[in-house]
Image: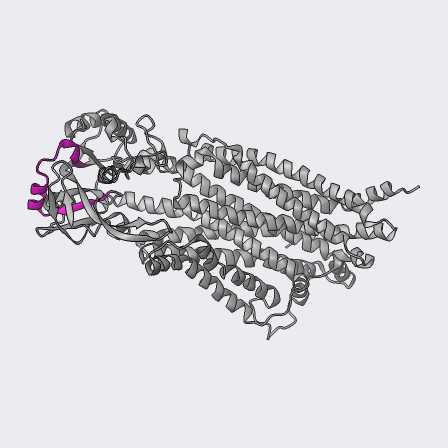
Amino acid sequence: MMTLKNLERKLLKADAKQARLYLFCHFVSLLLITAYSAMMYSPTVLTVFPEGGDSRKQMTAIFVLALFGCVVFTIYASGLFFRNKARQLGTLMALGISRRRLLPGLLCEVLFLSSVSGLAGILAGFPFLWLLWNSFRLFITDSSQMALRLDFKCLYLSALFFVIVVFCSCQNAWRYLRRTDVMDIMHEEHRNEPVKAVGPWCGPVGILLVFTGAVLGYKAPGLYQKAFSAYSPAWLEALLYMPAFPGLYMIMLHTVVHGWHSRKKHPYKNLIAKSMMKFQGKQTVNNLLVIAVLIAGGAFGIFYLPTLSIGRTMEINSRPYDYYYHYRQDQKIPGKEEISALAKKYGISLRDFQSVPYISLAMDGITRIEDEDNSFHLERIPFLKEARCLSADDFAAVSGEKIHVEKGCYMAVSNSDETGLYFLNATAETFTNMVTFETLSTRFSGYVHYDFLADRMGYYVLNDEDYRNISSGLTPDFMGRAAFFNIDGEDSYEFAQDFFYTLVDSFGPECETTDYYDRAQKYYARLQGEVYWVDTDSSTKISFSRPDESDFRLYWQYMPKIRILDKEDFSKTFSVFLMMFLFIAIICSLAAMVICYTRCMTIALNNRYVFDDLKRLGAPPAFLRKEIRGQAGPVFKIPAAVGMTLIYLLYILIMVGNDGKLTYSEIASLSGCFFILAALAAIYYLVYRYTVKSMCRNLEILQTF
């Protein structure tokens, strides 16, 4: 005798395929979000990514995109589950079972499936992260700083994601049970969701909105600051970017309704595939939108790798000397004889060794003073920053360029592309001797270019007579030397490493400072009765006991430039940065591929009856495979093309916006990014091929191409 429980058990078994799809989608989403959030909260990453820095902002922004994509994707999967479960609900209601009787069982099923898949995804997220992280350490680079540490606060984000998804799934369950027409419920899985017809203007207007949003969002904050002398509020920046999202939706809508090829010559070409896409247009447009956003986020993350590596490699190769180091004269640093003796141990010798003096002075200048209402005003302060100053003759000896600096003037040393002007002060009217507090009246007379001396603190060139006068009375801690030399023949990595460690050991604890430690600013803060911010816990700390850490290599104030060491240790120095952004790209790309695959398999499941009818009408396998490719192709190709193109153009906009031009290194980096996109496109194509084969297998169509 068939009981209600037996009937429910049979119906549940019939829905097993859709339940597995929901379990898979929920599991993958929780796995990706847990792994990403674990990386974001990892002390390993947070120690290296400076608080408030661009890298941490980029990491957070892409996480928001990934979170948005996974939420929409999982809610979509739950909607598919209930659409196919509608037949079971309709059958039970037709037998007279009330909604009140069905609701507890349905909610229990949703909670059970969500809990099992969600818990499994959360638990699997940590092994997934460990596997990727340690694969990077094993096959690419490793360092003591790469030891993965986890902060389980990341589980708050996973729990929030889980609650949102379960709540939306329960809402879907309640929405389906509220239906009154039993026949509508039973035929829900065959219900189409066509989009409203829009004119051909939709696509071009969408493209215009996307570019308008990108330009406004990127440029408007700077214009706001100039117009109102205040920092633009965060909500305004988000609002200005908003036109890009409806524009992106309109592009996808145009793709579904009209496509991007003219149909005047062949109006009936691919009619079946296009009609099937139109009839399920709402689902398709939403999926294409989410996929495009995820692909854009993944591409933006992986762009960090070629941009950093190519720019760094070009800078290293362009150096005129193999070695450069500088030091305060109160330190006992190895000279030419000691370094030559060390080099002999490794069978090499030095050439072109030279050393020039410099002095450290305080500069006045104009800076922003922040007010309480998020506004700011410009003010000249007497101790704006510390500056390393060379005489004109000493600069000529180093660079080989004879320059003339007028008395009472100064020039700032920039790189040849003038991309580091942000760190240089062109508003000074006074240099101050920090020991005698004698001052030198001066004015800015332009930039001189020498890439080797361009750094965060900056070098400045003074008239020879002014240099002698203002340096009178300086103590050794405000005087220094910069040394340069080449290796005669092939360099030795072992020597470079030994020289680096020897140099570090030669400095006293008073030089255990970062490159943004500024004695002029500290003095001015003390005059104002304030604590210098670098002396607080918010500042990055370095230690002579850990010279191989990326913080030390990147931020030590006296970090030497050693060509072979910087080349060989590049991946170690930037290992955490490279791993984080590579991981971001992997997470976003995996999410996009899973959504593409799920959407295509859903098309196959929901339209099986269409393909069965075509078989009965005598359609050959080649025709059916063509129609399947016509359905799967746009799901992969359109969001990939849109996401990659838009993020590439946005990246160009960012590079141009940084300094108003594209430098040679930036052009080379963009070329590297283009090849990265080509590699990503090839991977998406392979997934597309696999998906088409899976669709053919599911629909029992001959799987030959």
Relative to residue 491, is residue 11 depicted above or below?
A: below
* The residue positioned farthest toward the right in the image shown: 1
Location of residue 396 in the rendering, given as x and y in whole percent from the top left corner = 12, 46
Quadrant holding the N terminus:
top right
Q: Nearer the viewer, residue 220 or 235?
A: 235
Residue 681 appears in view? no
Q: Is residue 32 above or below residue 492?
A: below
What residue range appears in magenta? Answer: 457-485
In the figure, 372 relative to 557: above or below? below
Residue at image location 45% in from the left, 57% down from the top: 236
How many dots with numbers? 0
Judge left or right: residue 504 versus residue 206.
left
Choose top left, top right, bottom left or bottom right for residue 525.
Answer: top left
- Is residue 257 within the magenta segment? no
Is residue 81 left or right of 34 when viewed as pictured?
right
The image's colouring method is one colour
- Report whether 273 appears left or right of 549: right
Write down the quadrant of residue 464 in the picture.
top left
Picture coordinates of residue 473 (x, y %)? 9, 35
Q: Position of residue 149 (x, y in %)?
A: 48, 30
Which residue does the image show at 66% across and 46% down from the upper left? 167
The answer to whether one can see residue 467 in this image is: yes
Q: Residue 399's image quarter?
A: top left
Residue in front for this viewpoint, 442 or 614: 442
Q: Position of residue 23 (x, y in %)?
A: 68, 42
Q: Quadrant of the C terminus?
A: bottom right
Look at the picture and state if 108 lies above or below 261.
Answer: above
